[in-house]
Structure formats: C-alpha cells, structure tokens
Image (tube, rainbow, N blue to C red):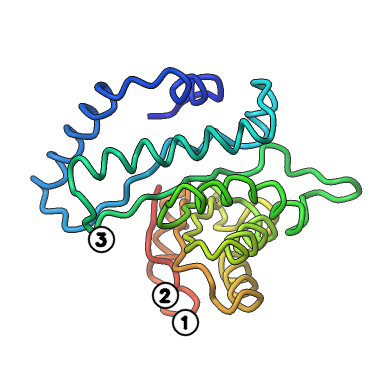
Amino acid sequence: MCLSCADSFRLMEDLDFFKIMEHYREVLEEAWSCGATAIFFECPTLNLNPYCGMTQGYSRDRLLEINIRAVKVVKVVKKAFFDDDPQILIVGQIGPMANLCSAGSDFATSMECSMYHGLQIMSFKEAGADLVFAKGIGTAQEALGIANACMAEEMPLVIFFDMDSEGNLADGASLETAIEMIDGKTDSYPMYYGAKCFDPDSLLKLICLDEVWKHRVCEYEI
C-alpha cells in the first residue's frame, strides 16, 4: 500500500492498534500458509523523512519521535504474534531523497545524503529495528551516503536500486560500477543489494550475468 506524505504521518498520529493488528494478522496467516520460514516486518517509515516532515510542519525532534513510534508499533505486533522469534526481523524503510540537486552539481554528494538519511537511521537504531531497507535509490552517491550513515549507527543495511531502461542508475552509473564503488569504500558493508528494472529485457540480461559483483544482487523486481 502506497501512502502519501500526509497519510503516512496521519497513520502514526492517529494509531488504531486494533486495525493494525488485524491487518498484520491477515498478512501473516497468508505468509505462513505459503510456507514462509522467515519474515521481514517493514515499518511504515518510507515517507517519514525530512522532506515530507518539512512539508507537514514537523520539527527535527518530532520527526525523530514519530519514526521511533513507527518502529515500536511493529515491534508490538511482532511480540503479539511471535514473541522474540529471531527469524522475524523488524525493518526500517527509507526512500530516496526528494531533491537530489545540490548546489553546483547534478546530484547530492554522499555526505549530503548521509546527513539527510541519518536522522531516520538513528531513530531505527534507538527504537530497536533489526535492519534498514533503502528503496528506490537512483544514484551511487546516495547509496554510499546511506551505507556510511548505517555504518555510523551499526545498522545492517540492504540497498535496492532503481534502474532505467538501459540498466543504469539515474546518475548514469551502471549497477556494476555502483556496487563495486560502494563495496570498495565500505568494505562490503551492505548485506546485499536489490535491483528494480522497468525494462524486462534489461532485467533478464542482468539476471543472466555470471560475474563476481552480480552475486551481491539477491533480489530483483520489475
């Protein structure tokens, strides 16, 4: 379910635990019926970012608080259904920067991205999330910035890249270049990578590759 910025904040402000528990119960029953042995519990934090927070009039402290709340809500659900099952992981989600333009450059630097995403990642750490999913990332520098911010908080990380019809990122870098750069600068800190490609042929070519870097890509989406 995709929520707008306003709806994402409203969801956390007007919590209805009964509805949330019922929603997760239905999803979990379906997952177990399909033979799932491990589950990623994704927290509704994708839009609880500094840009959306600013548009909704949230201060930095209030933004930190509402991200912590979002993680703790999912932890309550996990406790209710699974107690402390280690195969059920609480995931803090972050999306791409809303405005990647930086003064004098086409895209934000890794340091700018690290500072932008750092608040959410810090809140995930404080609330007790197990790992971070960075989704829809379109530049190598943003991915590097996220990796650096997660390293600073000692938060495990998975990065999902969005690719164009040519199989490249928005900054023109190939997936190979981005992954090798990030792994080289962070000692392969991300647990693994995911790739979303809007062109079936480009995705098929990627899946069929047999190169060392490609084995770091463990999820695909179209």
Q: CA distance from mark 2 to mark 1?
A: 6 Å
Amino acid tagged 3: Pro
Helix, strand or loop at mark 2:
helix
Residue under label 3, please give it: 86
Q: Residues within 10 Å of mark 3 (few under 14, many from 20)?
A: few
Sooner in the amino-acid sequence: mark 3 or mark 2:
3
In the orientation shown, which residue stands out farthest toward the left?
A: 33
Left or right of residue 25, residue 220 in this image? right
Question: Which of the pair 138/121 is nearer the observer?
Answer: 121
Helix, strand or loop at mark 1:
loop
Q: Are marks 2 and 1 in contact (CB under 8 Å)?
A: yes
Sooner in the amino-acid sequence: mark 3 or mark 1:
3
Amino acid tagged 2: His
Q: CA distance from mark 3 to mark 1?
A: 30 Å
Q: Residues within 10 Å of mark 2 (few under 14, many from 20)?
A: few
Helix, strand or loop at mark 3:
loop
Amino acid tagged 1: Val
Residue 67 image offset from top left, x and y in percent: 52, 38
Residue under label 2, please give it: 215
Residue under label 1, please give it: 212
Q: Which residue is found at the position 65% from the left and 73% from the top?
A: 181
Residue 200 image offset from top left, x and y in percent: 41, 51
Q: Which residue is found at the position 70% from the left and 59% from the top?
A: 141
**Closer to the eye: label 3 or 1:** 3
